[in-house]
Amino acid sequence: MSLRSQLLKGVLEGCILSIIDQQPTYGYELSVRLQEFGLSDVSEGSIYPILLRLQKENLIVGTMKKSELGPKRKYYHLTDAGIEALTEFKLQWENIKIPVDHIIKQRGGYV
């Protein structure tokens, strides 16, 4: 597994929660949105198991809605627990991102 895949695996759930928080979203649309943000290597095949797990953990709920272009689609939205999980993800992400950014931007010498 590549380094990028390993890093992405650790943050993909938080990214998915964040996209769903922006607006109710269905699986394929999640894939498209992730690609729009530059995560083109995330396949639908890796998104659906995460969606199932998030549902089992009561972080998201899926609702079937009529589609203008074909069969019904399951749109996901966050539960209260999902909002809490997203808030915690953002906090933990900042607690990791800021020091890592600081470390990798250092050019010689010590702080």
Image (spheres, grey):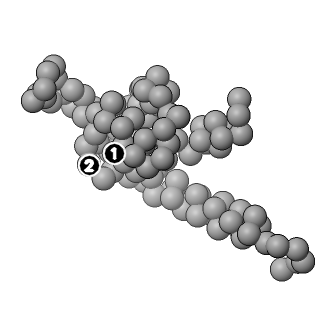
Label ID, residue 23: 2
Quadrant location of the N terminus?
top right
Quadrant in the rendering for residue 74: top left
Q: Are marks 2 and 1 in contact (CB under 8 Å)?
A: yes
Type of the residue with mark 2: Gln
* Quadrant of the image occupied by residue 100: bottom right
Q: Position of residue 62 (x, y in %)?
A: 27, 32
Q: How many discs mark residues in the rendered view?
A: 2
The residue closer to the viewer here, 97 or 33, is 33
Q: Position of residue 69 (x, y in %)?
A: 13, 26
Q: Is residue 40 visible?
A: yes
Q: Amino acid at mark 1?
A: Ile
Q: Residues within 10 Å of mark 2 (few under 14, many from 20)?
A: few
Asked whether 86 or 103 is in front, the reply is 103
Give the left or right position of residue 11, taking residue 32 as reference: right
Residue depicted at 36% across the width and 43% down the height: 33
Q: Is residue 24 left or right of residue 41?
A: left
**Residue of label 1:** 20
Q: Quadrant where the C terminus lies?
A: bottom right
